[in-house]
Amino acid sequence: MGYEQILYEVRDRIATVTLNRPDKLNAWTSVMGREVRQAVDEAARDEAVRVIVLTGAGRGFCAGADMQLLSGIVDAGVTARVEEPRPTDRDPSIRDDFRGPYAYFPMVPKPIIAALNGATAGLGLVISLYCDLRMAADSAVFTTAFSRRGLIAEHGVSWMLPRLIGLQHALDLLLSGRKFTASEALAMGLVSRVHPAASLAEAVHAYARELAEMVSPRSMRVMKRQLWDAQFQTLAEATAVANEEMRRSFGAEDFKEGVAHFVEKRAPRFTGR
């Protein structure tokens, strides 16, 4: 399907979703939100896709909510709200926690990697936090920005950020709204890798391709769900889930293939089943 504000490409079993308003540093709009949701759903349904990459066109990843949209809220008064894409999937197995307009990424059954190629601010930063992995260009600059706009820690960032980088770092970044660099983001654990800007896309694609070619899609699907659900579980609950999932894995085609390709010293041919 055609998109207005994003680009969508599938190559090497990797779906790349690119925010495409480079003249606005990919500032987020309601149209962009709907299109990202549609593209992610498309990638989730496509059996040819095993990994999803989210990135931005031009110099930025996402500079936050479009300022014209924020200005409209000011003009309309406190009863106005940002138009948001609403999840359509009502699968009863999905936690209410992951039904929000930006919180659905954790329940997508394929890994989502954020390739943060430049400015990552406000809502753009929040969206990146819901991705499973974040890799950044060495030139990328980050900010929460909310406190400098008279706003608060929105869209679950008060829950996500301390879990990723700890309470002290989260308080620092949210209260100050200051800018910070990719190297500082790496030191805090906000991103897992930093690459030279010119080679970020290639490096992320190489990592994603390794997942797509060498790893069981079924294993990734189950482990992703385990890890996100475990944020709400006790150790005993997480262990009970793991025991049941291990039992199911023993009967799966991917387990048989995982043993076979290792013994036969050949590349794996996983099916995801």
Image (cartoon, rainbow, N blue to C red):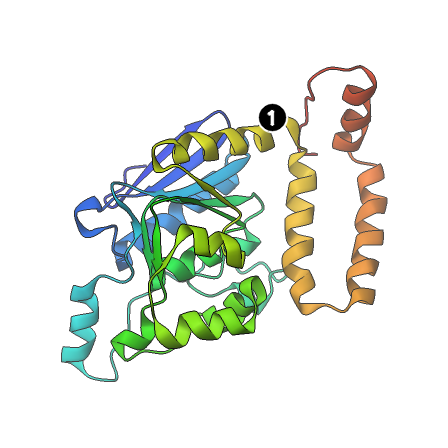
Residue for badge 1 = 213
Above or below 116: residue 98: below
Pick the residue in front: 196 or 54: 196
Residue 192, image x, y percentages: 53, 48
Quadrant location, the C terminus = top right
Q: Amino acid at mark 1?
A: Glu
Above or below 155: residue 24: above
Pick the residue in front: 222 or 145: 145
Task: Identify which residue is drawn at 61% across, 62% down.
Answer: 92
Quadrant location, the N terminus = top left
Residue 267, image x, y percentages: 69, 18
Residue 171, image x, y percentages: 47, 75
Figure quadrant of residue 76: bottom left
Figure quadrant of residue 50: top right
Above or below 37: residue 79: below
Residue 29, image x, y percentages: 26, 58
Pick the residue in front: 90 or 265: 265
Res. 227 visible in picture: yes
Tell me: 32 left or right of 257: left
Above or below 178: residue 53: above
SS at circle 1: helix
Task: Identify which residue is drawn at 67% across, 68% down.
Answer: 232
Tell me: 117 left or right of 218: left
Dot 1 alpha-carbon crowd within 10 angstroms: few under 14, some 14 to 19, many 20 or more: some
